[in-house]
Amino acid sequence: MSEIARLLEIMRRLRDPEGGCPWDLEQDFASIAPYTIEEAYEVAGAIDAKDMTALREELGDLLLQVVYHAQMAAEAGHFGFAEVAAGIGEKMTRRHPHVFGDATVGDATAQTQAWEVHKAAERREKGKSGEGTSVLEGVTRALPALLRAEKLQKRAARVGFDWPNRDGVFAKVAEETAELKAELTKETPRLKEEMGDLLFACVNLARHLGVDAETALRAANAKFERRFRRMETLLKAANETLEGASLERLEALWQRAKAEEKPG
């Protein structure tokens, strides 16, 4: 028995009404979905940490989520794991005719363009079956807001709806910042809307600078956490507490933690 077959059998037994796990039997697609999202982020976390041992484990946890959903779908008579694997295999073959067919591509950029042509054709084909043909089709609302913003912007850019250069995006960020500041002096519910517009513009700026916004923000989060923990360590060594330290003291320790990270 292959390891994949063994994993499928384990999940089948966990979901067996006769002797399966009570918790697993209670779950459905909706209740498992948050775990699926969490496991995907833990994979990304292991990659960020460059921890290959953790990555192996987290990839296993994510694979279990695929197996879990496939098992529930099979129980409902929709599809099974084999159909999932066959579907993605067929899709990858179709989208790589330069590997599995007679087509040729010049470089990675040309391949990306060809990939998008194939995806667009697939969206048009879905449109024939009543599933819609919008350029924005398939950008799921379940994505984290930052990632979804970037995907929406990229889709729009493919059809020419984009800033011609980064100067326009910098100007847009400045414009949205000014509009947000203007709302601070008013009794208005538009503050959240303007904050959203500014965030959207910042994602657009990151895209034009060739920076992945999600990755950049994860790195900023990690940097903040690292420096804050160092600040806590310094306070503890001085027999001080966060609550008892003044803002000036905390700022000084923050700058020390920051300076310690600089090379040399």
Image (cartoon, rainbow, N blue to C red):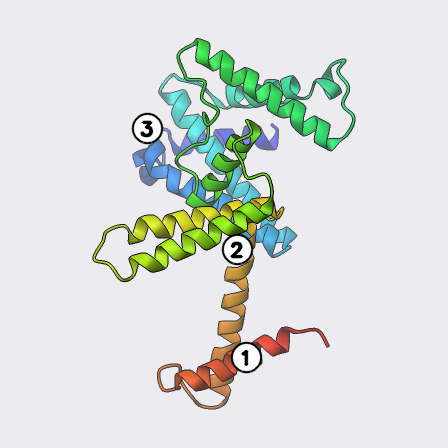
**Foreground: disc 3 or disc 2:** 2
Residue 202, percent from left and from top: 49, 50
- Tell me which numbered mark, 3 or 2, is placed earlier along the sequence: 3
- Whole-Å distance between the Cαs marked 3 and 2? 42 Å
Query: The residue under label 1 is which amino acid type?
Result: Gln
Q: Which mark is residue 17?
A: 3
Q: Position of residue 153 (x, y in %)?
A: 50, 37
Residue underneath mark 2: 218
Q: Is residue 135 above or below residue 42?
A: above
| Residue hosting label 1 | 255
Q: Residue at x 53, y 47 (%)?
A: 169
Tell me the element at label 2.
helix
Q: Is residue 220 above or below residue 192?
A: below
Residue 143 is left or right of residue 243, and the answer is right
Separation of residues labelled 3 and 1 (CA atoms): 59 Å
Residue at the spot 76% in from the left edge and 13% down from the top edge: 102
Q: Secondary structure at mark 1?
A: helix
